[in-house]
Amino acid sequence: MKKALNDEISECFDEVVALRRDFHRHPELGFQEYRTAAKVEEYLKELGIPTERIAGTGVVGLIKGSKPGKTLLLRADMDALPVQEASGLPFASETPGVMHACGHDGHMAMLLVAAKLLMARRDQLYGNVKLVFQPNEESDGAIHLIREGVLESPKVDTAFAVHLWTPLPSGTIGLQAGPVMGEMFIFKIKLTGKGGHSSAPQEGIDPILCAASVIQGVQAIQTREISSLNPTTIVFGKITSDGAYNVISGQVMLEGTLRYLYDGEDNTPQHPKKRFRRVVEGLCAAHNVGCEIELIPSNYTVINDAGSVAFLKEQVLPHLVTADCIQPYCCMAGEDFSEFTNRAGIPGALVFIGTGNPEAGSHHAHHTAQFNIDEATLLDGVRLHVHTALEYLSE
Ligand SMILES: [Zn+2]
Ligand SMILES: [Zn+2]
């Protein structure tokens, strides 16, 4: 029975590749996925799956199982990146300056083919599969879908997503419970001193000297306050002031990024954001410099639910790979799948599907002009989606 299904999935190889290549040829940036959305809708409608538009270019399809039960959300992201493709592939982007350089073309193809196989097995499903094609993952697509009710009617009980991942070799799966993708905040710090003549620094308050302390001082957070086993990076990318070579400036702006993998409570003193504020404010007080700190969320830590990970390892992954092909994995890159899981409180998990293979030319980093995936691994994603749904929505 299971073998037969996996054989049937294998027979979908040409179709999943063709879909992926079509998306790859026609990449669209976040919230501009018009052609992409139309293509997704057309495919689902042909299968008889009703669809709804959400957040402009998002598409939600609903497979209603023949028996009542829970609702499983499977997400594929749709957006490409502002990158000029230099892969040399015959199906390279036909849109100058835009490229599927993160594998989202593959994510959509995998979920569409999985939808086809699941639709044909509605009689085995106790509950519903909500197929979510999400725009603008690279920035902030998920939150818009949630605000427009993607988790309601029917109410979502669990959510899963996959990411094709070139840092992991083809044939392997990266999966672990807890934090798996980094949280990033952009910080902007305005330091206000008192300008003056540089011959008499005692008459002014020098925010540049304070800035130097802040830049040095916050590094203690990652090297002395947080375990080196919990990655944290604080990087200043831009410094500007209103001074001149012989003028003590009145104001300095510091901008940068704060990234970490943290799964504790948001409002505790141990949170990297709280530590950052404490250290910056303390140093500014010591320098008698006024400070305003703005922390702008970019994306939140993706935290995989332990129960969902156990479910995948015990009931789903054995359909795909042997146990030795599964490795614990986390990285500092950002993903807004966090909005569905730890932010909205829906238990679920994000699975990394290894697609790195020098022989397939898919050993380049994500977001680079040479990026490519190993198309042989597209079937891993189809299998993962199909078996996740069949197992989760079994009797
Ligand atoms: Zn990306
Ligand atoms: Zn991505």
Image: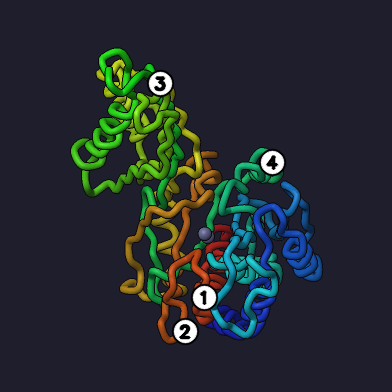
Q: Is residue 199 above or below residue 395?
A: above
Q: Secondary structure at mark 4?
A: loop
Between the C-alphas of marks 2 and 3, the distance is 54 Å
Residue 375 image offset from top left, x and y in percent: 54, 80
Q: Callout 2: 10 Å neighbours few (<14), some, many (20+)?
A: some
Mark 4 vs mark 3, foreground winner is 3
CA distance separating discs 2 and 1 = 8 Å
Contact between labelled residues 1 and 4, with CB atoms less than 8 Å apart: no
Residue designated by label 2:
360
Secondary structure found at label 1: loop
Q: Which mark is residue 192?
A: 3
* Quadrant in the picture for residue 49: bottom right
- Left or right of residue 103, residue 117 in this image: right
Give the mark nearest the N terminus, 2 or 3: 3
Give the camera-side residue of 259 and 109. Answer: 259
Q: Is residue 5 above or below residue 292?
A: below
Give the CA distance from mark 2 to mark 4: 40 Å
Quarter of the picture containing the C terminus is: bottom right
> Is tag 4's residue or tag 1's residue first in the polypeptide sequence?
4
Residue 1 % position (x, y) = 55, 79
